[in-house]
């Protein structure tokens, strides 16, 4: 096994004195290799090592799901319980099950988008404050169980359920039922971001090569918020291998794929995606929050686990783990797809009537095209256009008057876009609206959207008679304002 090549690859990615990363290679619950490069604290020049702790962001979801599954195994709840049974202050008009919360099939609006609209700051946000915001939500983005839409909201509500049913915070329950039995003493859900944690790497963004502080601000956990190190994660990979300590039944339940109402089986399970690496089955989850990126990956046929944790957002841990896995397996790097010439799409503007998402083709030749605000795609011999750079997991297909956008990693089904009218030159008309669900007002004056306490964004014309304001698409229908994007679909302001 080429462990030295892995170490060399990690060191080659990071310059001295910059934020960096730590990587681990695991087998049988043991760390075969832990290596690190870069700086945990740029200000004081503290180097990263195997015991440096990082916020692992959405890779935390598998640990939250395991806690809920433990309560189900204890007989204290059912995965088919309506979340409102345990969180009765929720005003959802339809039932959403705990299973749907954990598998992103409940259609729950994304809480980050909700707080952006209401104006609640992330700094100081905790479970109780967020629950007060979410309690007013009535509509789901689709009928629960009929589609997949990644939503951190379901995992936040799952953390609330753990507290209500288990009688402890998620942090305390996970410490007692997961981390203590596995001897994972450095792993903790950080539900108070104001408290200092020993050996926690500071988080950094990057602007033109200059590291800028970008630490986690909110204290909401469940969807993220777990802090761990590459050394401390070794026993978890032992559990993923064979269910040791915690039970094979828990491990198997964690890996059970989501199934939609129409029988469609999705690659998402409980906090982990099923996919392939170098033609081999794999499962894992990546994560990203301001200042931190992560990826946990396990290849069951090889009994091989990998983790990459970082305190910067320049190096993609998901792509790096793919490269490291191929090095360890003795496989060549992922080959570039054979280039080809494909017919150029006949339309420049496209939209998805389900989500109100739009795409605009800025430049196009037979060999490549550029999508506005998305990136470059290259034509390949398989008849698809494949994303480049950070979009390398996405693909496009054009067929007559439809454009299909898919991903080799996403659990949702490919999205079909249709030709759209080009943006008009008309400024969005002035108006004022109110959302009963969010309890906030929205207004437009002189082409500027203002929502809640703080959100202020220019609204520019977009395809299909809509307007674009930051991550949101705005549509006026019979005097009402519908807001989509960022994990929302048609949020109604009257």
Image (spheres, rainbow, N blue to C red):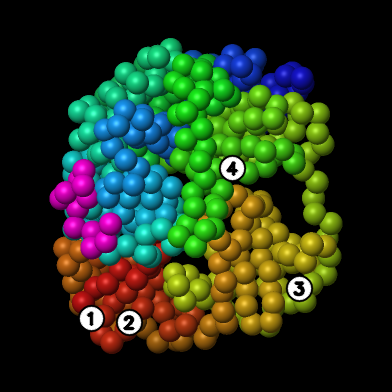
Residue 300: say if magenta. Answer: no
Q: CA distance from mark 1 to mark 3?
A: 41 Å
User: Residue at 57% of width from left, 82% of height from top?
Assistant: 419
- Which tag is nearer the camera, tag 4 or tag 3? 4
Mark 1 vs 2: CB contact within 8 A: yes
Viewer-nearest residue: 421 or 322: 322
Instruction: Please determine whether, in this image, residue 486 is positioned above or below residue 312.
Output: below
Give the residue pinned by disc 4. 274
Question: Would you say 368 lies left or right of 151 here?
Answer: right
Mark 2 vs 4: CB contact within 8 A: no
Numbered tag placed on residue 103 in the rendering: none
Give the residue pinned by disc 3. 365
Q: Which residues are magenta?
A: 84-95
- Which tag is nearer the camera, tag 4 or tag 1? 4
Q: Of marks 1 and 3, which one's residue comes earlier in the chain?
A: 3
Question: Would you say 437 lies left or right of 65 here?
Answer: left
Give the residue pinned by disc 2. 476
Q: Of marks 2 and 4, which one's residue comes earlier in the chain?
A: 4
Question: Would you say 427 lies left or right of 205 here?
Answer: left
């Amino acid at each position: 096994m080429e462990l030295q090549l892995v170490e060399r690859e990690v060191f080659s990615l990071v310059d001295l004195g910059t934020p960096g990363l730590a990587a681990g290679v695991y087998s049988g619950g043991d760390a075969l290799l832990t290596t690190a490069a870069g700086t945990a604290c740029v200000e004081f020049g503290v180097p990263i090592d195997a015991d440096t702790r990082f916020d692992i962001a959405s890779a935390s979801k598998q640990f939250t799901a395991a806690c809920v599954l433990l309560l189900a195994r204890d007989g204290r709840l059912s995965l088919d319980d309506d979340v409102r049974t345990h969180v009765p202050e929720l005003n959802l008009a339809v039932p959403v099950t705990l299973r749907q919360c954990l598998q992103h099939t409940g259609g729950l609006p994304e809480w980050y988008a909700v707080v952006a609209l209401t104006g609640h700051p992330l700094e100081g946000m905790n479970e109780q404050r967020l629950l007060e915001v979410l309690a007013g939500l009535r509509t789901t983005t689709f009928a629960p169980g009929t589609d997949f839409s990644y939503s951190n909201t379901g995992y936040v509500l799952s953390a609330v359920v753990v507290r209500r049913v288990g009688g402890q915070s998620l942090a305390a329950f996970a410490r007692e039922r997961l981390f203590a039995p596995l001897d994972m003493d450095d792993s903790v859900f950080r539900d108070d971001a104001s408290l200092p944690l020993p050996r926690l790497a500071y988080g950094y963004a990057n602007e033109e090569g200059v590291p800028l502080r970008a630490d986690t601000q909110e204290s909401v956990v469940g969807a993220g918020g777990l802090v761990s190190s590459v050394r401390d994660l070794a026993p978890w990979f032992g559990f993923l291998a064979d269910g040791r300590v915690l039970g094979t039944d828990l491990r198997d339940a964690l890996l059970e794929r989501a199934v939609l109402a129409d029988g469609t089986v999705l690659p998402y399970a409980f906090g982990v995606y099923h996919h392939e690496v170098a033609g081999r089955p794999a499962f894992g989850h990546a994560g990203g929050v301001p200042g931190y990126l992560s990826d946990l990956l396990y290849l069951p046929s090889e009994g091989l686990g990998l983790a990459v944790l970082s305190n910067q957002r320049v190096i993609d841990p998901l792509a790096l783990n793919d490269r490291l896995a191929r090095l360890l397996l003795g496989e060549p790097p992922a080959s570039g797809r054979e280039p080809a010439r494909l017919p150029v799409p006949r339309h420049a503007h496209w939209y998805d009537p389900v989500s109100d998402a739009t795409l605009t083709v800025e430049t196009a030749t037979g060999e490549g095209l550029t999508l506005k605000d998305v990136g470059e795609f290259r034509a390949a011999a398989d008849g698809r256009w494949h994303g480049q750079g950070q979009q390398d997991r996405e693909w496009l297909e054009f067929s007559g008057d439809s454009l299909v956008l898919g991903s080799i990693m996403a659990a949702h089904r490919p999205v079909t876009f249709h030709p759209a009218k080009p943006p008009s030159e008309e400024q969005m008309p002035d108006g004022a609206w109110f959302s009963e669900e969010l309890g906030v007002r929205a207004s437009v004056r002189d082409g500027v959207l203002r929502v809640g306490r703080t959100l202020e964004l220019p609204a520019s014309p977009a395809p299909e008679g809509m307007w674009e304001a930051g991550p949101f698409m705005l549509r006026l229908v019979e005097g009402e304002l519908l807001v989509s994007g960022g994990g929302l679909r048609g949020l109604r302001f009257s």
